[in-house]
Amino acid sequence: MGIPSRIILRRISQAWHPPRISPASLNAGCVSSLGFARSEALANLFREHVGSCGVSLVGTKPYACPTCRDMQSSEASGRTSFYYCTPDHYLLSLLHGDHLDDCRDRLNQRTQFRVGILVTAIIDLCLELIGHHSLYKVCSYVTGNGKVMDRYIVTRHNCRSCPTCKGEWERANAALQSDVDKKRLKHFERCVWAVKITTHLLAYLCQELGVSFIELDFAPSIQLPMEAFYRSREGKMEMRHSHASKHTVLVLLHSLSSHDFIMDRAEVNWKMATVIDPTYVQMGYSESVTSWSEFYPHKIRARTSVNAYCPGRSLEKSSDEDFGLMEDIMVALNNATYKVLGELGGCVKLFKHWADEEFEQGVDRILEELQLAFRHTRRSWDGRNCNRSPWSQSMKDREKQHAVNKWFEEGNQVMREAYRSMRSRV
């Protein structure tokens, strides 16, 4: 049985001795004064010992709440922390002040933000190593309604690994195009694809972290319109694509337990929601992870166009385009991520307990493993399916069997089971 909070408070107040300082040596500008004491009695205790509630000693380093420090809700926002002049005051505020609820909400938002950072980094890496479109030329023109439209001339490559195809791919990507334009092309019309390949991973992360997620599509407010003209390797124009009428993103929501699932949009606490837009660059947006309060007013063109769906909707939709390759990518993603998460000590440790620097190092470790896995996946797929592949039939059969074996590895099975469990509650 735990110790009652009133006894802990008594012990803290008895053990803590106020510093012998003059009022002039106090700095009353400490940010920890935000809602520090609810009761007048507790406020009087602070005044008696340190002169005023939430003060900080000059020349001393303030004590930050270790649970919710460096909270960030979007890429554009800075990191914030709750500071206290002493660890004792932190404990007092946690037990009898306002910080307990704030701390829980801030930790949840930081966790959701970190999941979004990882998902976006994975999509960027995957599109870089797996994609098969190269940018030939970019030009701009003014449309009839006076808007500037960026036109991308794109070359489609069926293979990028076989000796002949690899040379064509490298020459095509050696063109002097900006990194931003190349990234916009990779992201163009890949929002549903990005949601599909990360669905198993998100189901597993949500199960471990006590988070829920939904899929959202809406009519987007496009800041930088673009269109793509696709041509064959021989230079023949094949088709023209512009932005779809709907854009799909992921929304992370905190749930009280790992088994909760929010199915009714009316029950969603949108105030605490975090939006992940893995293909944000195609719309001209500056950030991929943001809070719902920042996302909703600026990036949704028509409020009546917003539709929320249960997770897995995009994955369950039938699509024949690159299905085999997409399946191989998902298997590689599941196995590599699960392996590294285990080496790092698990999801809770990485996303909730580690400081920002440690978290960034953990993400880098995951991306290093994924880079190897994605390169092998692309090379294996091209070798087995390209008609210019130098591989013998026996080599293709061995590689195909190796891909089947990968499907049965622990990481892929655990993440697929997490997805099946999530779908059973829908």
Image (cartoon, grey):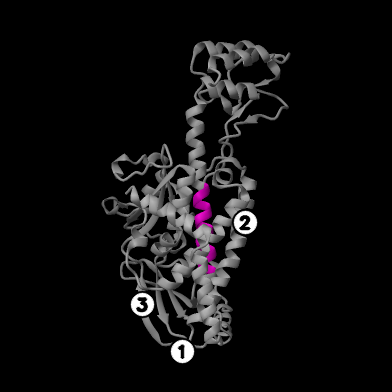
Three-letter amino acid code at the position of disc 2? Asp
Residue bearing the label numbered 3: 240
Q: Secondary structure at mark 3?
A: strand
Residue bearing the label numbered 1: 234
Q: Is residue 265 above or below residue 17?
A: below
For the residues labelled 2 and 1, the Cα–Cα distance comes to: 39 Å
The range drawn in magenta is: 114-128
Three-letter amino acid code at the position of disc 1? Glu
Q: Is residue 26 above or below residue 259?
A: above
Residue bearing the label numbered 2: 364
Q: Is residue 244 visible?
A: yes
From the top left corner, tell me how far across and down residue 198 is, in percent.
Answer: 45, 58
Q: Residue at x 44, y 78 (%)?
A: 153
> Are the residues tagged 2 and 1 within 8 Å (C-beta)?
no
Q: Secondary structure at mark 2?
A: helix
Q: Residue at x 56, y 87 (%)?
A: 390
* Type of secondary structure dominating the magenta stretch: helix
Image quarter for residue 128?
A: bottom right
* Crowdedness near tag 3: few (<14), some (14–19) or many (≥20) residues, C-alpha within 10 Å: some
Q: Residue at x 62, y 61 (%)?
A: 368
For the residues labelled 3 and 2, the Cα–Cα distance comes to: 37 Å
Q: Is residue 76 visible?
A: no
Q: Earlier in the sequence, mark 3 or mark 1?
A: 1
Image quarter for residue 241?
A: bottom left
Q: Is residue 11 rendered magenta in the image?
A: no
